[in-house]
Amino acid sequence: MKEFLSIGQIINTHGLKGELKVYPLTDDINRFKLLQNVYINNEEISIEWCKLQVDKVILKIKGVDSIEEAMKLKNQYLDVKREDAVELSEGSYFIADLIGCTVYDDHNNNLGEVYDVIQTKNNDVYWVKGKKELLIPALKTIVVNINIEEKIIIIKPVEEWLSE
């Protein structure tokens, strides 16, 4: 499992004094209010303050005091150590842990690996690449078992997915 988890991506500057506009990569944008430190390129950085917008976060980090310094960080990811990540409820998983899992149907046929997780309004969708690409809704009626330690997901497939 990855030691660091990305919680946001710096998408632009904000103002002239080094503030950063961040696109959150977490389900709970309020978690940014509790952050004291983040990692950018494996370097620990202190957060001076943050302000929440509807779907973005404005951050001021220590040592970035001009728009020019802030521009150098554009497109970088904000990471936290796994042990500092939010605690997940039972049956919830970090997307970083799902990516790369091998997906099998309930007859032990290898369908491929999770390439990405698409978040939709109603449920997540696992984008699986194998002999063919599949979009598998992450529903309890379809996803039978997830074992993050072994990187295996078992699903009950819909017949149309398996036909060539």
Image: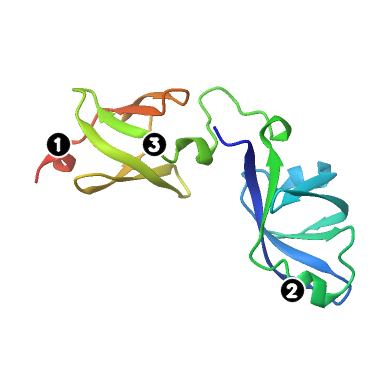
| 153 sits to left or right of 163 | right
Residue matched to label 1: 159
> Residue lying farthest left?
164
**Quadrant the N terminus occupies:** top right
Residue matched to label 3: 138
Residue 147, image x, y percentages:
43, 23
Which residue sits at x=61%, y=50%?
25
Residue type highlighted by circle 2: Met
| 74 sits to left or right of 45 | left
Residue 74, image x, y percentages:
68, 68
Which residue sits at x=86%, y=52%?
47
Residue type highlighted by circle 1: Glu
| 127 sits to left or right of 87 | left
Sequence order check, earlier mark of 2 and 1? 2
Residue matched to label 2: 71
* Disc 1: CA contacts within 10 A as few (<14), some (14-19) or many (>=20): few
